[in-house]
Amino acid sequence: MNLQLINTDLLKNYISLVPLDLNTLIDNLCNKKTALTKDSFDFYTSIASVYSSKIEGEDIELDSYLKHKYLGINYLPDYTKRTDDLAIAYKFASTHPLNKNNLLIVHQLITKNILIEGKRGTIRTSQMFVTDKQGNINYVAADAAIINTEMDKWFSDVTILSAKVLENYEALFYASMLHLTFVDIHPFNDGNGRTGRLIEKWFLADYFGVNAWNIESERYYYENRQQYYTCLNDLGLEYSTLDFSKAIPFTLLLINSLQL
């Protein structure tokens, strides 16, 4: 495959590290429910939305959010609204194909209560960096001058991959790499992490069906968030000098989440 961003040379090493029971894990996932109901879909996307929000520092607890969602317990709007927005974005993605227009809509939904209206679903035009809690720069994202070019490459890879019949391990590998390359480009002013984690399952739904939305990857990433961020940071400090040969540990996190 002539992919523009994803390094397919990593697959050989990746395959050697894939657990022997991977296909059994996938079969269990796909057979979990022959038809995912609206209630069960909402339940799993609620879990995903809570943990993806918590990764970004949101003060939201799963128990409280489920009470809000299913029992009508009222909380202050600031406590639930950004998680509600993310759940709505998951629902939209589950019924629409992964393409540029729909991705921008998903970002609009995710950032409804994060960014001002003019910045939602809009590629950034300014420089971007990521800091830790102490204010130290952890990462310098793609230069604003090359974002559109890099995202064109990213969408080209999505288009090529979506047209291929992939083995289970390949689908998981490419889903992880789409997540990784997206957050490394960091194309938006905010909401990149939430969007990247959603993209991963959005892509997988084409291969594993609707039950791909059952994968509790966001929960796994949250519960192992130090490892999640270490795997991201190990590639390098700046987009222009990232070493994607070090991406394998990140791609294995998604496989690990299948065991939850």
Image: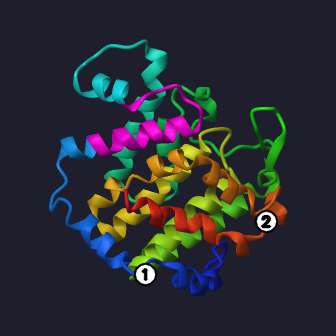
Q: Amino acid at mark 1?
A: Lys
Q: Residues within 10 Å of mark 2 (few under 14, many from 20)?
A: some
User: Splitting the image into 4 quarters, where does residue 213 fall?
Assistant: bottom left
SS for dot 1: loop
- Against 89, is 248 above or below? below
User: Splitting the image into 4 quarters, where does residue 31 fall?
Assistant: bottom left
Q: Position of residue 132 (x, y in %)?
A: 76, 38
Q: Which residue lies at the image location 57% right of the left edge and 41% below the top edge?
A: 121
Number of marks drawn: 2
Question: Which residue lies under the disc numbered 2?
Answer: 242
The boundaries of the magenta stretch are 43-62
Q: Quadrant of the N terminus?
A: bottom right
Q: Position of residue 96 (x, y in %)?
A: 36, 54
Determine the CA span between mark 1 and mark 2: 27 Å
Q: Position of residue 72 (x, y in %)?
A: 25, 19
Question: Which residue lies under the disc numbered 1?
Answer: 164
Q: Amino acid at mark 2?
A: Leu
From the viewer's perspective, is the residue at label 1 or at label 2 nearer?
A: 2
Left or right side of 197 for 36: left
Left or right side of 128 for 75: left
What scheme was used to colour the molecule? rainbow
Q: Assess whether mark 2 and mark 1 are in contact (beta carbons under 8 angstroms).
A: no
Sequence-first tag of 1 and 2:
1
Q: Which residue lies at the image location 52% right of the left edge and 25% below the top edge?
A: 59
Q: Which residue lies at the image location 31% right of the left edge and 68% below the top edge?
A: 208
Q: Magenta residues: mostly which secondary structure?
A: helix
Left or right side of 50 for 63: left
